[in-house]
Amino acid sequence: MLPTPTKFTLVAGAGEGYTPLNAFDRALLEARAGNVNLIRVSSILPPGAEYVEELALPPGALVPVAYGATTSSTPGDIIAAAVAVGIPAEGFGVIMEYSGHTSRLEAERIIRQMVEESFAIRGLELKKYMVKSVEHQVIKNGAVFAGILLWY
């Protein structure tokens, strides 16, 4: 059993590469999440988790993350990814992630609505909202990644 994370940070990056996977790798590196093994989790921020600007992650670490990402091989495409977390006065928070062929501002608009709805259906009052997003115009093979990294 994994321990419950006590820290979190929001990251985002974009990249170009020889292949879509190389572009994704570059986006991870730009987001400071490229030299670890990401374990995708669903969207609950543990109660009391502390926001930190940057996490010191050892290479190869198994890192829980909620993320949105997309790639495109169509030159000129605009792609974006965003993550957001809503935090109530007490208890757990809710993380949402989004990615698509849209602008960063549209991704931020959509994800704000997602967080607000997730709070409404849980009967929670939103006290704090944090968002991180990225946009990229594809040259050959492009990728975007936005994530909330959880750590101990």
Image (tube, rainbow, N blue to C red):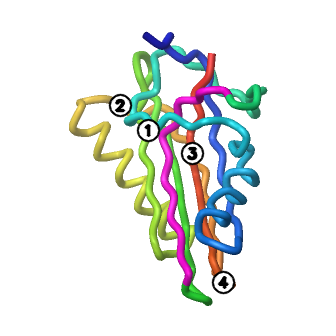
Task: Name the residue tied to disc 1.
Answer: 95
CA gap between label 4 and label 3 equals 23 Å
Q: Residue at x 56, y 19 (%)?
A: 49
Disc 3 and disc 1 in contact, CB within 8 angstroms: no
Q: On residue 140, which mark appears?
A: 4
Question: Is 75 a magenta residue?
Answer: no
Image coordinates of residue 21 in percent, x first then y, are 60, 63
**Dots 4 and 2: beta carbons under 8 Å?**
no
Q: Earlier in the sequence, mark 4 or mark 3?
A: 4
Count of numbered badges drawn on the protein: 4
Which residue is depicted at the point 21% across and 38% down? 121
Query: Is label 3 in a helix, a strand or a loop?
Result: strand
Q: Which residue appears at 42% of the width and 45% of the height?
A: 96
Q: Quadrant of the C terminus?
A: top right
- The magenta-colored residue range is 61-73
Q: Are marks 1 and 2 in contact (CB under 8 Å)?
A: no
Tag in front: 4 or 3: 4
Could you tell me which secondary element the residue under label 2 belongs to?
loop
The residue tagged 2 is 125
Residue 133 lies, with reference to residue 100, above or below; the image says: above
Provide the secondary structure element on which disc 4 rests: loop
- Seen at 53% across and 76% down, the residue is 72
Which three-letter amino acid code belongs to the residue tagged 2?
Glu
Identify the residue under disc 3.
147
